[in-house]
């Protein structure tokens, strides 16, 4: 009987450790995304948990909590194949005993997603795919933007006793985004080298990356008052954090959406709106300019490649 009680005690302890970890939040967000995919009939949307990326500093594979791949197609009357991939790179943090505070800045911040396309694989300029990232109707335009943040422990029993959780999550996203950019460029180059008649079946897709932190904890926006050192605090559930990560192996700027867990549903609706706006953009001058630039670049590449083997 004592062994049975000990076993139940171990199970209860294990359940508590799992509950305190980030896995329940990761599973909850992944489940939400899968349900949204089914609800919106986005059959081509892919949700991956535990996706890997290569850390250039340690030369080891690391794990990203969730990666979502959303293909955005041209309207059928324009083109049938894919025009843009929107990729959500998500880290989940569950630290209910901690508070993340973001400090409102007076200067203007322009937030845009990182992007790449076949043009980067060819070292071709101008890179017209950048126009997609600067499209004014993306959700970044309507979000509070910040550069400064801090983390505090309010309840040690519900905390992991660390105050670098947000910093760690943004570094992970910087490394994962850098890997995705490099890997995409390598993939495009492999495609070009594998098929002889690339002008007949051009791949003119661009990829946009949204790094996201989902936080199960409290978030506040701090703004200075008239008195020196005094700050007003307002609860907030979504900010866009501009993050610049520089090291011996990295030099990348990120606009990171930091979203409180309970607000993720509303946030995802803004992603849905972005998808629709980008879909429409493919049919505008921006999309036409991109396709024309790709064809010019491919024509140049085929000429230089064929010349090389004569």
Image: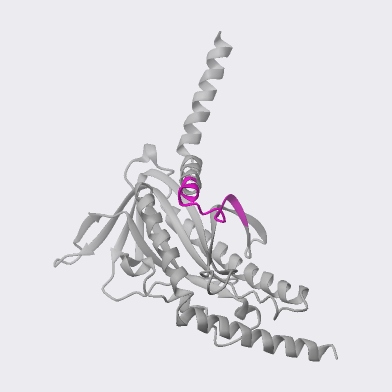
The reply, left or right, for residue 201 in relation to residue 279 is right
Q: Residue furthest left?
A: 226
Can you say whether 156 is above or below 245 in the image?
above
x and y, in percent, of residue 278 in the image: 45, 69
Query: What residue is at 30 percent from the left and 76 percent from the top?
Result: 108
The reply, left or right, for residue 117 in relation to residue 30 is right
Q: Is residue 252 visible?
A: no
Residue 56 placement: quadrant: bottom right
Q: In the depicted view, which residue is nearer to us: 62 or 290? A: 290
x and y, in percent, of residue 54 in the image: 64, 61
Q: In the depicted view, which residue is nearer to us: 267 or 303? A: 303
Which stretch appears magenta?
Answer: 35-52
x and y, in percent, of residue 7 in the image: 56, 18
The question of residue 40 being in magenta is answered with yes
Query: What residue is at 35 percent from the left and 58 percent from the top?
Result: 150
Can you say whether 79 is above or below 7 in the image?
below
The question of residue 129 being in magenta is answered with no
């Amino acid at each position: 009987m004592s062994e049975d009680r000990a076993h139940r005690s171990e199970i209860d302890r294990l359940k508590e450790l799992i509950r305190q970890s980030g896995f329940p939040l990761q599973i909850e967000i992944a489940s939400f995304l899968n349900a949204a995919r089914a609800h919106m009939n986005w059959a081509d949307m892919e949700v991956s948990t535990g996706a890997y990326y290569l850390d250039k500093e340690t030369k080891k594979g690391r794990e990203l909590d969730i990666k979502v791949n959303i293909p955005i197609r041209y309207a059928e009357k324009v083109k049938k194949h894919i025009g843009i991939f929107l990729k959500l790179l998500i880290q989940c943090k569950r630290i209910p005993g901690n508070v993340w505070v973001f400090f409102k800045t007076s200067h203007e911040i322009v937030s845009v997603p990182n992007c790449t396309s076949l043009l980067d694989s060819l070292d071709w300029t101008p890179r017209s795919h950048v126009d997609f990232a600067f499209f004014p109707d993306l959700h970044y335009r309507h979000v509070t933007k910040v550069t400064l943040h801090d983390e505090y422990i309010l309840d040690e029993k519900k905390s992991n006793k660390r105050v670098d959780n947000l910093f760690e999550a943004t570094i992970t996203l910087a490394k994962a985004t850098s890997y995705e950019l490099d890997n995409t460029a390598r993939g495009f180059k492999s495609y070009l080298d594998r098929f002889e008649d690339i002008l007949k079946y051009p791949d003119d897709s661009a990829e946009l990356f949204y790094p996201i932190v989902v936080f199960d904890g409290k978030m506040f926006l701090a703004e200075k008052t008239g008195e020196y050192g005094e700050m007003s605090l307002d609860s907030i559930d979504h900010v866009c954090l501009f993050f610049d990560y520089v090291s011996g192996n990295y030099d990348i700027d990120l606009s990171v959406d930091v979203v409180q867990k309970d607000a993720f549903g509303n946030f995802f609706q803004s992603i849905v709106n972005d998808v629709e706006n980008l879909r429409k953009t493919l049919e505008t001058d921006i999309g036409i300019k991109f396709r024309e630039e790709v064809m010019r670049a491919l024509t140049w590449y085929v000429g230089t490649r064929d010349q090389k083997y004569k």
